[in-house]
Amino acid sequence: MKRMITIYFIMLISALLAGCATNLNKQAIFNSRTDVFSQISQNSSIPAGHADLNISASLKTHREFECPINQKHTHGTAEYKLVLNIDGQSAQLNGRFQNESSESRGLMDPEAGDGIRYRFDGSLRLKAGKHKIIVALPGDGIAIEKEITLIEGDVNYLILEPIYSMMPGKKAPGLYSTTSFTEGIRTIRLMLNGREAE
């Protein structure tokens, strides 16, 4: 009986978290404002009270024909998107993708193997100070919400790092679970100016 209650509780929490991610995904795509930031093509002098935000992400996914976990079948195609929403203004980052076959660089290299490498980047100009940011990968049902603080007059760097899911039943020496891009992206870590956003 205790085991059944535990399983039910885990299923309930998983459903709630999935619902939260779905709502955040919708919120990320929805554009309720247009005055929060402007996209810039190159760094120029920053007006008083403003800051620049350079965003980059590099991640790896299945190829298009190897996507049993992704029912929307956007992996390996130009339809795979990365969306940002800052204080209600939404933008889609420009992405490039290519086939990648890489050898393992160690026992726990999560990006070893054949797949598709995506690189996203963009540059924004907005007011300095605190902002609420949502980063979403709609094709994976992932959305993360954080608060960031941008330094006035500076170029700030936001790096989005994928955290891949664990491979079932595989443990590396030392009993650490092994993660792999083949299992999908579990979440995204936001690194602002070298520190993890909270």
Image (cartoon, rainbow, N blue to C red):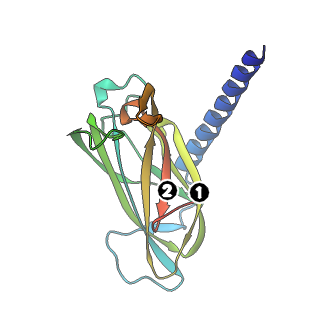
Find residue 189 and report its horizontal and vertical position in percent: 49, 52
Q: Which mark is residue 155?
A: none
Q: Nearer the viewer, residue 37 or 163?
A: 163
- Looking at the rendering, in which quadrant would you find the C terminus? bottom right
Instruction: Identify the amino acid type marked 2.
Output: Leu
Is residue 70 visible in the rendered structure shown here?
A: no
- Looking at the rendering, in which quadrant would you find the N terminus? top right
Residue at point 73%, 16% (across, down) = 4
Find residue 60 and report its horizontal and vertical position in percent: 33, 41
Q: Which mark is residue 190?
A: 2
Instruction: Identify the amino acid type marked 1.
Output: Lys
Query: Is residue 4 toward the left or the right of residue 14 in the image?
Result: right
Q: Nearer the viewer, residue 9 or 88?
A: 9
Q: Which mark is residue 146?
A: 1
The image quadrant of residue 87 is bottom right
The image quadrant of residue 100 is top left
Find residue 62 and report its horizontal and vertical position in percent: 33, 32
Residue at point 59%, 47% (across, down) = 27
Is residue 58 visible in the rendered structure shown here?
A: yes
